[in-house]
Image: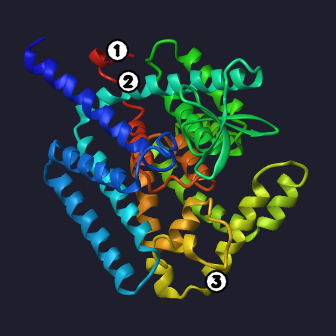
Amino acid sequence: MSYKNIYSIKKEKFDFLLILFSAMLCVPFSVFSGFTDIYFTLSFLMMSSIYLISNSNLNKKSIKVLTVSFSIMILFSLIYIGFDLGYVHSLIIQLVYLTLMIAIYLYFTSATRLESAKPIFMKIIIFVSVVTIMAFLGATFKIIPFPMRTIGGYDIGYNFLFGGVSMKGFYRPQWYFSEPSYLGFFLGFAFLFLKKQYWIKYRIVKLALVFIAGVLVFSMTFYFSMIIGLISELIIIRITRFMNPMNLSKVYLVSFVIISAIYITQLNKVGKVFFSDYSTSFINRKNRIDLSLATLKKMNFWELSVGKGTGFISIDKTRKMAESDSYIRTLIENGAIVLIIYLFIIYYFLRNNPSLLLYTLVALSSVVVLETPFFMLIILLAGESGKKIPHKIQLVT
């Protein structure tokens, strides 16, 4: 192997580590909470974005994406600032996050880079799963110390090597995420991604590890969304001869939008049927949605189109709780136009894996990760998951 190839491989590994580190400086992670200043973080994220864009293989398509994306960002920013909508501090953070998300996309427009990163992503999945299982066992049997610490406004047990564990009646691992539900979302996403990687070694063992870790998080996001995802797998087996994956993904997207609209307007009935006898976070989420619905009813056509401004929910004096549904939060703060764009992005990247698409659509109803570099990274890495990894790359998995 030539020196040039060795340098290229090392540089790609460095770039991927930079992307991971940058993503973990953002929501929904809490690993650096209390250690970094917000202005330092935002400055670092902007420098990372500039570096990634400058090292991207830009072509006509990527330049068009870059131009359109920044044009939309500038337009909406001018609207929010000009009409005094939302909260400027939140808008700045959102713009930095979106810039990094675009940079990550542009960097991975190279198919070679994307396929080279997937084996590393798979190793990270297994590592997080093993650490999650160890954290649960270590906390439950008092083998691993998890001293109490306040992170992101929550009192949790925290170990620098194993991350956090929520202590509400029983131990719920959350790794370096802000809450267990985010870890549950990631593990469910990872399981359905790995399930399609038929060529990897010890696939069944790896799937078992991820699934066990997900179960031990005790997250309704994982349980409910995973059931939906697995039911989708059964549907695919039945109709694969009549409908290709992309057409099925279109059906899932349209069906999800319709069912979600019905679900939101019938929350009381849903609660009585499915959650009346269980101690879950449903009631809390329902209360948040009720507050959001009250806001939506007062919004005019213009506000429904462009939103009430980034950060509006955090400064709205009529509510005491934030919104845990990514779609409702986006609709209120950024409007229907931006929400439709996000739904298209999710469909575009995950359209070849209908089960993962449906899982993601459902799970985003309970975790707010839609506008984060973490989310852009994982849907990019999971995209085209039915495509076999080249032989040379397989050897490193």
In the foreground, 30 or 394: 30
**CA separation in Å, label 3 and label 1:** 54 Å
Which mark is first along the chain, 1 or 3?
3
SS of the residue at dot 3? helix
SS of the residue at dot 1? loop
SS of the residue at dot 2? helix
Q: Residues within 10 Å of mark 1 (few under 14, many from 20)?
A: few
Split into 4 quadrants, where in the image is the C terminus?
Answer: top left
Asked if the residues shown at circle 1 and circle 2 are in contact, with their CB atoms under 8 angstroms apart, the answer is yes
Q: Residues within 10 Å of mark 2 (few under 14, many from 20)?
A: some
Split into 4 quadrants, where in the image is the N terminus?
Answer: top left
Residue 151 image offset from top left, x and y in percent = 59, 46
Q: How is the image coloured?
A: rainbow
Asked if the residues shown at circle 3 and circle 1 are in contact, with their CB atoms under 8 angstroms apart, the answer is no
**Which residue is label 3 attached to?**
297
Task: Tell me if residue 350 comes above or below residue 301 in the rendering.
Answer: above
As shown in the figure, which amino acid type bears the numbered disc 2? Pro
Which mark is first along the chain, 2 or 3?
2
In the foreground, 237 or 187: 187
Which mark is first along the chain, 2 or 1?
2
In the image, taking residue 364 as reference, residue 122 lies left or right, namely: left
- Residue drawn at the location 69% of the way across and 21% of the way down: 138
Task: Tell me if residue 364 comes above or below residue 31 in the rendering.
Answer: below
- Residue drawn at the location 46% of the way across and 26% of the way down: 124
Residue 336 image offset from top left, x and y in percent = 48, 73
The quarter of the picture where residue 180 lies is top right
**CA separation in Å, label 3 and label 2:** 47 Å
Q: Residues within 10 Å of mark 3 (few under 14, many from 20)?
A: few
**Which residue is label 1 attached to?**
396
- Residue drawn at the location 40% of the way across and 43% of the way down: 23
**In the rendering, which numbered label is found on residue 119?**
2
